[in-house]
Amino acid sequence: MVSSIAHTGNWALGSFSRRSDEAVFPGLVSTDRVLDLSAHAAVGNPASTLDLLERWDSLLPVLDALAETSPPGDWIPLGELDVASPVAPRQIFQCGANYRTHVIDLAVKHHDPADGRTVEQVRAEAAAEMDSRLEHSPYVFLGLPSAISGPFDDIVLPRDGAQPDWELELAAVIGRPARRLDVSEALDAVAGWTIVNDLTLRERVLRRDMPLLGSDWLASKNFPTGLPAGPVIVPRASAPDPSAFQLTLKLNGETMQDESAKDMIFDVARIVAHCSQVATLLPGDLVLTGSPAGNGLVHGRLLRPGDVMDATITGLGAQRTSCVAETS
């Protein structure tokens, strides 16, 4: 259990239970206390945060009023509750290779000195390639909702996974059905922001038996507990500029990732708009926006049982997850 969540704005939205074996309810969070929204007729006694996101635009002023006027006795101390993923998404859109420095570092890491190029040449070529990508579209694939876990749950490392790696990411939470959005209107479809850590089994990213088919995202991601989300959804109105976010991940207290969202190649609006051109976005969907430099493969230090990760994004709270071995 956690006693407080440092978030920007007057309130945030989350999912909670009084015990881990009890039903999860949607709650309004104000730092160290939670208002059980399932008991409030003003918002329709919602059973989940998805119920709220389905009516996000109309409920925003109601949620603002509840945060301001609910009597102190209606709130539950956060420390008495377990924190679950703030949303159970129906679709997860994952943008890959979207931080310039991250992709350049990986190119250098995979460089074969036998090809005759210096590290400086590899870095310069990768930088030029990243700059040219803006002429094209974001690279987005789909994740499975079954991989989602809570922000303080254990991460169960697959027993047949050789190179488990972390990938801290900003996720946009969709707040209305959306199709074929223009970039200029894309952020209007975003209800708010949350933290995710999109773990990857690096050895499974490329299909070496069928190289022409490229990346295998089903096998390299999507293992149960491999996508911790939360702790809360912070409304976009409280954090209107996603480029202002700073993403920081520490492994056993040592900083591994610490990067500004300004290093994104495609900004959030471009990514959301692109996804809406391909599919219909639904309330509660997560749109992941890529991971910054500092993944384990570059550090030469991958995850193992006993590791503890602390992940933060400015104003969105923090995750703390422990890695354990799969035993069954």
Image (cartoon, rainbow, N blue to C red):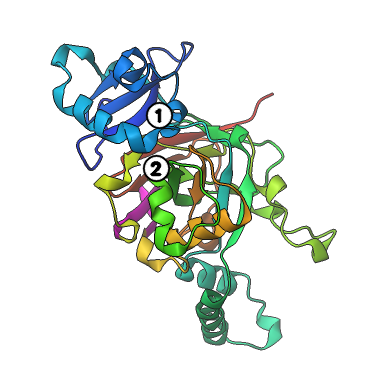
Residue 226 bears which disc, if any? Answer: none
Is residue 252 part of the magenta span, yes or no? yes
Q: Is residue 194 left or right of residue 113?
A: left
Q: Nearer the viewer, residue 201 or 213?
A: 213
Residue at the spot 38% in from the left edge and 35% down from the top edge:
56
Range of magenta residues: 244-258
Q: Is residue 7 left or right of residue 255?
A: left
Q: Is residue 25 left or right of residue 272?
A: left
Mark 1 = which residue? Answer: 52
* Image coordinates for residue 236, horizontal then vertical, percent: 32, 47
- Closest to the camera, between mark 2 and mark 1, is 1
* Image coordinates for residue 215, horizontal then vertical, percent: 71, 58
Q: Does residue 256 appear in the picture of this structure?
A: no
Residue at the spot 53% in from the left edge and 35% down from the top edge:
89
Mark found first going from the N terminus, 2 or 1: 1
Mark 2 = which residue? Answer: 194
Is residue 28 part of the magenta span, yes or no? no
